[in-house]
Amino acid sequence: MAKPRVKAPSSVKKGQVFEVKCLVSHKMESGQRKDRKTGEPIPRMIINRFVATFNGKEVFSADWHPAISANPYMAFYMKAEESGDLELTWIDDKGEKITAKKSITVG
Amino acid sequence: MTEPRNPAACSRRRFIVAAGAAALAGFSGIRVAHADQAMVDEAMMKLIGDRKPGDGTMIKLDLPEIAENGNTVPLKFEVESPMTGDDYVKSVHVFAEGNPRPDVASFHFTPASGKAAASTRMRLAKTQNVVAVAEMSDGKVYMAKKEVKVTIGGCGG
């Protein structure tokens, strides 16, 4: 798995609302396509859940369906009252997880 | 065309032929049926129950009027809300009325989100309405809708 790309400020003011953008490589196979040669359906294999926590507490999450594009991009907002770690987790249909972490300092 | 096909594929093939060659224009691969209103209602029912959504004037749904590539259509929204502990947007559910399956995504917010806004990219199989339903912390639901014209459909949205 390729490393996810995360863009978030490394330092923010207390209570300031800021944007977090992230991108992860995944084919997001919808389960709707068929193999052109055999006619067999290609099994669904997508990331169905995305969770963002800050210091262990959920700030934002999403449930994704096959209509989310390949290499899913997600941008959301959050605010922080104290310095800590932003942890992002992507979970696929097999339960496999991709994670990313970013420290954010509240000044 | 000589390789054996299973009966399901055969009947689908016949259906497509019957539906006319026009339906095939612009598509490679095998087409699938699109959602009908019943499927949209059912998908919505699963998430918000039988609550009747109000007019979503506070939902700003930012979608292109024309999407050239249905495989990656930018979806952006913002719901006006104070986002405090006792008054915030809990979730926003997005549906695509003309996709094989209407569910697109559900986004869940907390007061620590600060702002009930998000953006991502989605697949749209054809020109259709995209619906956003916002669920507030007090249980009220609101709905906004916008049409997106799709030039090249995203296969298997």
Image (cartoon, coloured by chain):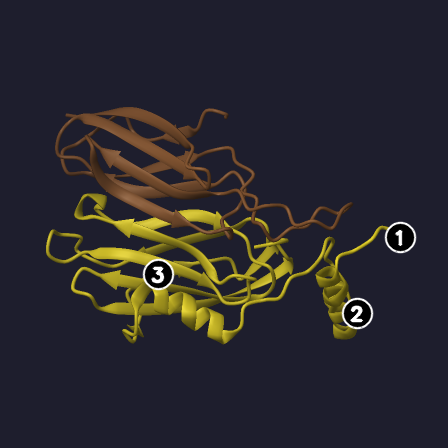
Chain colours: A brown, B yellow
Please give the residue where the numbered disc 1 appears in the rendered image: B2
**Few, some or many residues within 10 Å of mark 3 (<14, 14–19, 20+):** some
What count of labels does the image hold?
3
Residue A17 lies left or right of residue A64; in this view the side is: left
Frontmost residue, B25 versus B8: B8
Residue A31 location in percent, x, y?
A: 58, 50
**Image quadrant assignment for residue A53:** top left
Element type where label 2 sits in the image? helix
Other residues around mark 1 within 10 Å, as few (<14) / some (14–19) / many (≥20):
few
Pinpoint the chain carrying mark 1: B
**In contact (CB < 8 Å): disc 3 and disc 1:** no
Q: Amino acid at mark 2?
A: Val
Image quadrant containing the N terminus of chain B: bottom right
Nearest to N terminus: mark 3 or mark 1: 1
Report the quarter where the C terminus of chain B lies. Answer: bottom right
Horizontally, residue B39 falls left or right of residue B6, namely left
Does any portion of residue B55 appear in the rendered image? yes
Camera sees residue B57: no
* Residue on which disc 3 sits: B60
